[in-house]
Amino acid sequence: MPVISFTGFDWLFVVAYFAFLMILAFRKGWHDQNEEMFLLSGRKMTLPAFVATLVSTWYGGILGVGEYSSQYGISMILLFGVPFYFFSVIYAFFLADKIRNHSALTIPEAVGSAYGPGAGRLSAIGVFILVSPAPYILMLGLIFQFMTGGEGNFLVYATVVALFSVAYVSFSGFSAVVRTDELQVTLMFGGFLLLIWYAWGISGSPVEVWNSVPETFRDVSGGQTTQYILVWFFIALWTFVDPSFHQRSAAARNGKTAKRGILISILFWIVFDFLTLFSGMYGFLILGAMDNPVMVYPYLANEILPAGIKGLFFITLIATIMSTMDSYLFISGQTLGRDLLKGWLPRADPVYLTRLGILIAAVLGILLVIVYPSVIDLWYVIGSVMIPGLLIPVLGVYLPAFRVRKLSAVLILTVASGVSLAWLVAGTLHGDADVTFLGMEPFYPGLLVSFLIFVTDRAVGGSEK
């Protein structure tokens, strides 16, 4: 691992960033917040705030983007961009306004209103696991370990940053998430523009870089098989069950704001995807082949940026990851506290239960990092198991074409995810490196079971209104 040359000037910017986050978060106090205000900012979020918080939240996996773009080039847009643009457009036109006009504040509450409290609690378990902050806690720990020259345990850094987020998210709720996201989205774009500017002076313009990288970097498929590319379109179905999309749509001032906000966000994502793509290709040309390509952005910044500017770019990486971690911490907390614990503690204040849930979610995320210290593995396991069970029940709340009877919804939530989990375990025990079993990824058997239950439900009784 390269030795970073981080100066006191760089650290000054990092400290200032965290201080400014606290100022933004604590602009409103702990008290006098009702449930709707704490969870959804009173459902009055404006279009600029909507775009800022959605754009920044969707990019927590920035290190994974760097890893892929520095090895395969333009195909990063096809795999990590196009599928998500496509399903986001569908979400904007068919779901956003329906979610805003629904009385439910969360996905489990919406599922419970459609299929009964049992289904709601089952979906809450799935949502809680789906939005685990563990991958983002892990990435922050690794970045801080690199910034300190590899000294210390990354888990200590990860814990400190996670508890820092717990403090300000618990204090002001969703409003704190939105206000800090407005700062973080500015840093995201500004930081990568700076990185490209300095890389341009070393390796030439993006056009020259495009002509200098290997031919495989310019191949839209990246040399990947059609089956592999198709997998990412299935993974992008995550969009339909992603609680951050649901939360922001529900918090918008109206349905029109939610729809327009998503469409505008897609344009920002496209621009940012190309910024990260060319940053990865600059990293390949300047640094050469790396043993640890997931760290291409930190390594490139360390190599080419001067003191001060380097600190600003590392703030960019921290902000990009923290924007997602903050959101997922908050959603995990409200899911555990409001949607699960509230059923056992009916007299308790849901706001305080959410605050308790945020702390518990952070602690569980840290423990998960100890057990499973791999970002990619965490994403793979969580998505493969949870999405097949949640997809049809969540869509059915808002789209009559996907509505099933209550029993079928419960079966999909339990059996589909159970099959994916069993397939994952079987593949792991079988000894395959990619945890497939019988040549199939665990996502597909669960999705197939979900579809079969859906088709059977329609054949024997039709949807239940």
Image (cartoon, grey):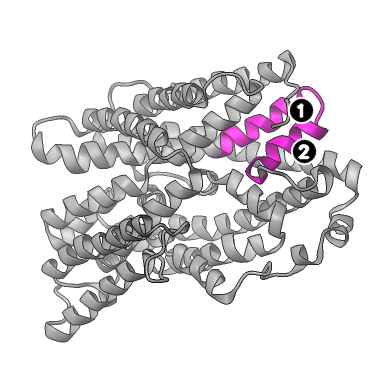
SS at mark 1 in the image: helix
Where residue 86 appears, x then y in whole percent? 52, 68
Residue 409 - label: none
Where residue 95 appears, x then y in whole percent? 37, 64
Residue at 68%, 69% (x, y): give it: 223
SS at mark 2 in the image: helix
Query: Residues at badges 1 and 2 in contact (C-beta under 8 Å)?
Result: yes
Residue identified by numbered label 1: 309
Residue at 23%, 27% (x, y): give it: 352
Q: Amino acid at mark 2?
A: Leu
Tell me the quarter of the picture where residue 234 sits: bottom left
Residue 45 visible in the snapshot = yes
Q: Main secondary structure of the magenta part?
A: helix
Q: The N terminus appears in which quarter of the rendering? A: top right
* Residue 316 is inside the magenta segment: yes
Decide: few, some or many residues near mark 1? Use Cα within 10 Å; few <14, some 14-19, many ≥20. some
Tell me the quarter of the picture where residue 19 sits: top right
Where residue 149 appears, x then y in whole percent? 66, 22
Q: Amino acid at mark 1?
A: Ile
Q: Report how far apart the C-alphas of labels 1 and 2 lie in the structure.
A: 8 Å
Residue identified by numbered label 2: 194
Q: Which residues are magenta?
A: 293-320
